[in-house]
């Protein structure tokens, strides 16, 4: 099926914007310019910061080096490299701010055998944790002979800081607040200032010099709406939008610019048959939070579903693991001509809607 999209909608005040969708496997990048056709804007799919930094840790592990982690709370995908370091019998220390990458409860970090210290112990090699390294990006863009942008916008998944309770439950309370108190408008999830519990997004925003940030789930739904036909369809009937990432998947029930339901799971704990079964229950409001949570997912929440949404049948699937639903009654749109950059186009779409 062919989908179209407007060149830039009402957008972006004439600015070049570096848009980053930071996942666990890749970081998907769009250097948007209002003066260039969207197909010709530079685009990149690069290893995620967690993998880049993890590879540095791996090299230090093979050299037998103890490491000191410092700077930021970043994506948890780096944790497996930290555990590998400890399992190799090497020492790991961490600045408090960086230690939150591994757990909200720092006693869990010290129980792993990691020393919390604000200074690098003698003989340890510093390793900086961050989802956005400005020096790296300046070097990258300079090597590609590309300009430094007027602004930076970014999305990443943030479980949030929820000491004393499950991160999965704590994160889902944010969705509950969004649906029940925030009105369910997806563009409201583009944050000038993220909620205080979203500590990863807070650190990321500081590193991108105060640009807007959002969760990857919100960016995905907005990315689908970058496609003109999907946005139009969503005002005529309810639709289901699904983003299947490398680690997490999220689905939304959308009608007339409002999200009426959220479903979130871990990609590795479902297959196509299980996911499709869950989505069928989700669309009719028959799937409970506990059903998903007990299956190791994050949860599910639906408000009263409007009858005129007609069951939210049309289903559009995005994400690097989208082929999980290959063979089912779904479409696979490519916002802006590139499915992997759906989150980046979602940032552009969200800014235009605001």
Image: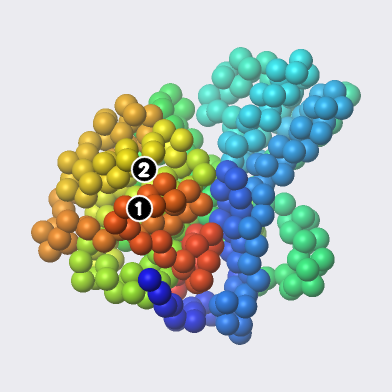
Q: Residues within 10 Å of mark 2 (few under 14, many from 20)?
A: some
Of badges 1 and 2, nearer the viewer stands: 1
Viewed as shown, does residue 320 lie left or right of 328?
Answer: right
Viewed as shown, does residue 295 lie left or right of 49?
Answer: left
Q: Residues within 10 Å of mark 1 (few under 14, many from 20)?
A: few
Q: Residue at x 32, y 38 (%)?
A: 274
Instruction: Tell me residue 318's x, y (percent).
Output: 43, 57
Q: Residue at x 75, y 72 (%)?
A: 146
Quadrant of the rendering where the N terminus is positioned: bottom left
Q: Is residue 161 above or below residue 194?
A: above
How many numbered marks appear? 2
Q: How far is mark 1 from mark 2, CA to CA? A: 9 Å
Q: Is residue 158 above or below residue 106?
A: below
Q: Earlier in the sequence, mark 1 or mark 2?
A: 2
Instruction: Tell me residue 273's x, y (percent).
Output: 32, 40
Considering depth in this image, is 149 or 281 the residue closer to the camera? Answer: 281
Q: Residue at x 12, y 63 (%)?
A: 308
Q: Residue at x 78, y 38 (%)?
A: 56
Instruction: Tell me residue 90's x, y (percent).
Output: 78, 19
Residues under numbered marks 1 and 2 in contact, where contact means CB atoms less than 8 Å apart: yes
* Residue 272, label in figure: 2
In the figure, residue 110 lies in which quadrant? Answer: top right
> Tag 1's secondary structure?
loop
Instruction: Tell me residue 68's x, y (percent).
Output: 77, 29
User: Where does label 1 land, which residue?
Assistant: 327
């Amino acid at each position: 099926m062919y989908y179209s999209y407007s060149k830039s909608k009402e957008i972006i005040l004439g600015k070049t914007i570096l848009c980053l969708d930071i996942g666990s496997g890749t970081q998907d990048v769009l250097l948007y310019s209002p003066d260039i056709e969207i197909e010709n804007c530079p685009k990149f799919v690069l290893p995620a910061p967690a993998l880049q930094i993890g590879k540095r840790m791996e090299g230090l592990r093979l050299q037998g080096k103890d490491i000191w982690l410092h700077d930021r709370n970043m994506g948890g995908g780096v944790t497996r490299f930290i555990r590998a370091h400890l399992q190799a019998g090497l020492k790991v220390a961490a600045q408090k701010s960086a230690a939150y990458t591994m757990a909200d409860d720092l006693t869990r970090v010290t129980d792993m055998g990691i020393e919390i210290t604000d200074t690098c112990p003698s003989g340890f090699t510093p390793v900086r944790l961050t989802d956005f390294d400005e020096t790296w990006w300046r070097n990258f863009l300079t090597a590609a002979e590309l300009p430094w942008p007027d602004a930076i916008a970014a999305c990443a998944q943030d479980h949030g800081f929820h000491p004393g309770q499950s991160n999965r439950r704590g994160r889902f309370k944010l969705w509950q607040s969004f649906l029940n108190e925030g009105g369910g408008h997806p563009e409201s999830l583009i944050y000038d200032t993220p909620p205080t519990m979203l500590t990863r997004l807070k650190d990321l925003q500081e590193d991108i010099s105060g640009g807007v940030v959002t969760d990857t789930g919100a960016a995905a739904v907005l990315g689908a709406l970058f496609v003109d036909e999907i946005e139009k369809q969503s005002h005529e009937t309810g639709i289901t939008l699904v983003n299947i990432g490398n680690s997490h998947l999220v689905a939304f029930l959308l009608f007339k610019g409002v999200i009426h339901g959220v479903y979130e799971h871990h990609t590795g704990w479902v297959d196509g048959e299980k996911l499709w079964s869950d989505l069928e229950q989700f669309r009719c409001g028959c799937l409970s939070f506990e059903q998903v949570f007990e299956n190791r997912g994050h949860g599910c929440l639906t408000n009263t579903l409007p009858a005129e949404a007609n069951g939210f049948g049309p289903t559009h699937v995005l994400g690097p693991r989208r082929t999980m639903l290959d063979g089912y009654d779904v479409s696979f749109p490519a916002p802006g001509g590139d499915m992997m950059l759906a989150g980046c186009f979602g940032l552009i779409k969200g800014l235009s809607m605001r």
